[in-house]
Each structure stands twice: as C-alpha cells, then as structure tokens.
Image (cartoon, helix red, strand yellow):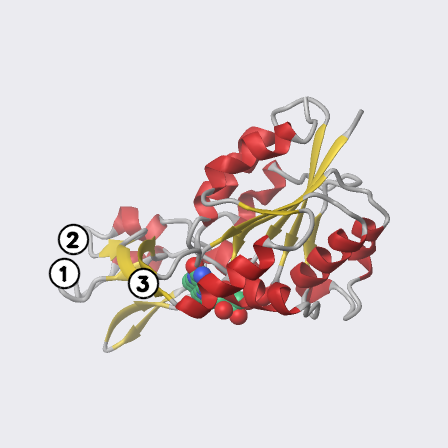
Amino acid sequence: MEFRIAWCITGAGHFLLESFEVFLKLVKKKDVKVTTFLSCAGEEVARVYGILDRLEKISPGNYYQEIILEREQDKGFPKTGRFARNRYSALVISPATANTVAKMACGIADTLITSAFAQAQKGEVPTYVVPTDLRAGIVMTKLPALVDHDICIDCDTCLPLEKCPNNAIKIIEKPVIDLTLCRGCKTCVELCPHSAIIFGKEIKTKVRKLDEENVNKVSQLEGVKILKHPSEIYDAIFYIGGN
Ligand SMILES: Cc1cc2nc3c(=O)[nH]c(=O)nc-3n(C[C@H](O)[C@H](O)[C@H](O)COP(=O)(O)O)c2cc1C
C-alpha cells in the first residue's frame, strides 16, 4: 500500500538542511510518496540554502509527488483539501517558523501551510511539527552565503562576481550577495581566493517566550506531535505504520 507523506517547508533556515536530509532518506523506502508544499517564504529560503533545485529528488512530479508552491495557488488553497479527504498518512511541517506556529496556535489558516495544517486537523491526519523556536533562550543557527567584509580585500577582479551563475553578487562599495537572486550553489565560496565568502556561518539567535507559548498551544491540539529535531521525523513516521 502506498504511504503518502506531505512535507511542508516554511521560511526557516534553521533545521532546513537537516529536514532535507531526512526526506532524502524517507523516499528511499519502498512505496513512500512525498508531496512537498512550500510557503512563499519557504520557497525563498529553500532557494538561498541551495535545496530548491534539489527538491525533485524528493518529489519528482508524479501524482502525490508534486512540489506545490504557495505563490502558484489560489487563495483558498484547494490542494489542501487533500488533507480533509484523508489522502495522506502524515503531515510533517519541518522546519516550522515562529510565524507559522503562531498562526496555527490561533487557528489562522491564510497560507498554504497553515491551511494544510487546519485541513489535516479536520481530516484527522497525524501531524508532526518541528518548530525553529521551541524553547525560550539562545539557539545557534546557520546563515546562507555572505561576504565577510573583514576578510574581503576588494580584489580588482572579483572572481565570484564574474562567475556567479545567477549574477547574485553586486558591488555596493564592497561585494555583497543579493539573496533575492542567490540559489545557494556555493560557486562563489569555491572561487574566492581569500575564503571571504562563507556559507553556513553560525550565529546566535534568541527564541522569545511568546514563541515557546505558541508551540505549547499547538502541542495540545489533537493529533499533533511536536518534534525537537528533524532527526526524529523518521521514527515518528514509521511508528504510525510505514514499512
Ligand atoms: C534567510 C532567512 C532565514 C530565516 N530563518 C528563519 C527561522 O529559522 N525561523 C523563523 O521563525 N523565521 C525565519 N525567517 C523569517 C521567516 O521567513 C518570515 O517570518 C516569514 O514571514 C515566514 O513565513 P511563513 O511562516 O509563511 O513561511 C528567515 C528569513 C530568511 C530571509
């Protein structure tokens, strides 16, 4: 029997690459089909972290293996009717932004992902949420590509700028990466002779008490399980009856 999973990506860099790795592993299982849903911000963030162009490995485009983009959908998100009709064995929202979790906690369903969540509740589809902002305090997160201006020495010819396949590097006094064009291919990282372009730089970020409270509210909804890390998705999915 086919085991259909809906994977929802919201606009979070935190846990994004880890979520992608888990789904690459999941689709290797026999009879597992994954539909990938992306919020508008999810599509942007997946692009700059370099996974947007690789999502076809998870959802190659067949029935129930589509990549569904919020910006291409009508405002009522008819595709999320699949959840109310119980067409999926599981819904996984990973990573889930603080924004999406806040909306889910209040019952707001005005985006592709929050609508999927609301419909899944109506269709009693088991739902797994991996929030980026789980517990109040400091967490470490990784940034997409950036030029470190403490290292950049402003070469006369900037190789990354010349060779970027997406023309995403501009000079604004010094070279900067235009994240609206970047596709996270890392060509620039390899080409800079001074290693001034860094992908995945770690920074500290603060999780608010408000976001923790929203996660707690969502955890109390029927059929919803909060997972601390994407690595927990695999076991959670197979616990509900996969092969
Ligand atoms: C590169 C980048 C990374 C981001 N990472 C996060 C994140 O880890 N967690 C989060 O809550 N928001 C993050 N955001 C902000 C969200 O994308 C923003 O709140 C957006 O409105 C979320 O929309 P969505 O919940 O519909 O996907 C990030 C934004 C950018 C541009």
- Indicate the position of residue 210 as horizontal and vertical percent values: 45, 69
Of badges 1 and 3, nearer the viewer stands: 3
Local crowd size for mark 1, using a 10 Å CA cut-off: few (<14), some (14–19), many (≥20): few
**Decide: marks 1, 3 in contact (CB < 8 A)?**
no
Whether disc 1's CB lies below 8 Å from ligand 1 is answered no
* Mark nearer the N terminus (1 vs 3): 1
Residue 24 against residue 110 in the figure, above or below: above
Give the Cα distance between marks 2 and 1. 7 Å
The answer to whether residue 46 is visible is: yes
In front here: 225 or 118?
225
| Residue at x 75% of width, y 52% of height | 120
Identify the mark at residue 194; answer none if there is no mark.
2
Disc 1: which residue: 151
**Decide: marks 2, 3 in contact (CB < 8 A)?**
no
Identify the mark at residue 36; answer none if there is no mark.
none
Which residue type carries mark 3? Thr
| Residue at x 83% of width, y 52% of height | 84
